[in-house]
Amino acid sequence: MKFALRDYQSRDVQHIRNRFRQGDQAVLYQLSTGGGKTVVASHIAEGAVKRNNRVWFLVHRQELIRQFSEALHELSVHHGIIAPSFTPDPFMPVQVASVQTLVLRLGKYPAPQLIVSDECHHSVAASWDKIIRHYSAAKLLGVTATPCRMDGRGLGRHCGGHFDSMVAGPPMSELIRRGFLSPPRIYAPPVGADLSGLHKRFGEYKQGEVTAVMDKPVITGCAVDHYRRICSGAPAIAFCASVAHAEHVADQFRAAGFQATSVDGTMSDVDRKNRISALGNGQLNVLTSCDLISEGTDVPVVAAGILLRPTASLSLVMQQIGRTLRVSPGKDCAWILDHVSNVDRHGLHLLGHPDGDIEWSLDGEAKRTKKSDTEKSLRTKQCEKCYAVYLPPGPKCPYCGHLHEANTRKIEQVDGDLEELDVERFRQIEERRAAADKKREEGMCKTLEELQALAKRRGYDPKWAYVKWNMRRQGRSSGKGLFE
């Protein structure tokens, strides 16, 4: 072994092993991106192999195959690779397997005793689920930074997932405090995009609608301008709405004098790897992509994330932000340029602060460990000059030094009662969050019977469930307020 575990990694390894010893068949390990999930999983695998067990690592990207393979080499663990362009060695005790390849070869390899599922929030997807169920006798270790599903349901066995228990590593704020992650600086510059009319399909905004809204020269130009003003030249990843959008954004950055290119799944592995490497070695300023580099891409020097794709997925936005948080020499922060209100949408204003830590659960709900989302959004302040979002220790922006006018609250008197004008803002935020909660609850209803039960709990006319069900079957999303 060529490297030692950090103290929390060693502790988490023991906690995971204890869960298996106590009889759990499947354990989920949660740790923030950059905290070293691969290292922990590799040590678990190393111990299993020493006890003559077969271990498989399930991954879904070529970059992750290389990442796990390198970690195993560091531990001197010999292994085979089940993926295109690799010669299979089915009798190796450890295999790093592409999910897309392995699902087509079920039963062709000696069965494993332990399966390690990387980015295991995908584990209920068809290919992952088929593999896990086919080898149901094997113990399962899932690792992810974001144990949540798009439909809001949990990953626990009682929610239709695979896992019996969860071991959570230290929260993001602790990893930042100890120097293992870079502190984020969040900026939310306006881009003039109207996102109010976006519709959802399977819990996420429809890609065509998102692309139509975001892929406009004025919006892309705004993104380029704010990158130049806030973190010009810093290695950055721009997360876009489609492959075409990513190409157009790269074009705009090049036209502004920056070295930029896009990357997508149609490229060869070599070409894709070279472009990602170019970002890491300074040949590129900006790399643009749709989904390809939201997970698993490990380029520690990346110091800026440019969010140009609105998403209803907390998991996706956390994975995107996580690409920027790894530490690297000379890097003192991670700039998050949120042009699509993802931070506000998911209540991430205090990301990196103890009050902003997320308490994950196998039940499907991600909760803030201390303050409510409403309190957090009101405690933060946005600089009117640089658009930074921060906790206000005083009237001066800690990032650009802009001096804000003192915020003297106006109070009006009505029939002897004192009311702060800020009450209206409280009400608007509460209404917005309540509406989102209601919509999420409706999305979790997968049958007509579940919609009928929800209608009964809410006191709606019974016809509401039938209308909702018929509209869903027809692919429509309108009808708000019917029978309510």
Image (cartoon, grey):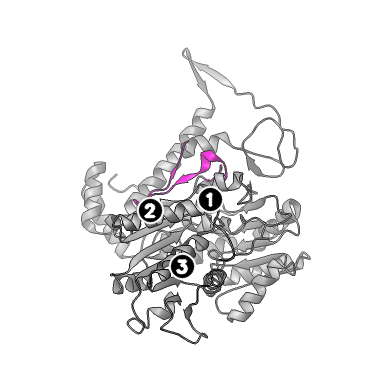
Q: In this view of the protein, can residue 369 be seen by the observer?
A: yes
Q: Is residue 459 above or below residue 107?
A: above
Q: CA distance from mark 2 to mark 3?
A: 21 Å
The amino acid pointed to by label 1 is: Asp
Asked if residue 86 lies left or right of residue 334, the reply is left
Mark identifier at residue 7: 1
| Tag 3 residue | 46
Asked if residue 126 lies left or right of residue 169, the reply is left
* Quadrant hosting residue 214: bottom right
Number of residues whose C-alpha sits closer than 10 Å to that of mark 3, classed few (under 14), some (14–19) or many (20 or more): many
The amino acid pointed to by label 3 is: Glu
Residue at the top extreme of this rendering: 416
Q: Quadrant of the N terminus?
A: bottom right
* Quadrant hosting residue 204: bottom left
Q: Nearer the viewer, residue 92 or 389?
A: 92
Q: Secondary structure at mark 3?
A: helix
Q: Nearer the viewer, residue 43 or 355?
A: 43
| Tag 2 residue | 166
Looking at the picture, how far across and down is residue 261, in whole percent?
68, 71
Number of residues whose C-alpha sits closer than 10 Å to that of mark 2, classed few (under 14), some (14–19) or many (20 or more): many
* Quadrant hosting residue 471: bottom left
Looking at the picture, how far across and down is residue 230, in whole percent?
73, 51
Q: Which mark is nearer the camera, 2 or 3?
A: 3
Q: Earlier in the sequence, mark 3 or mark 1?
A: 1
Magenta segment range? 348-370
Q: Earlier in the sequence, mark 2 or mark 1?
A: 1
Q: Earlier in the sequence, mark 2 or mark 3?
A: 3
The amino acid pointed to by label 2 is: Met
Asked if residue 186 lies left or right of residue 79, the reply is right
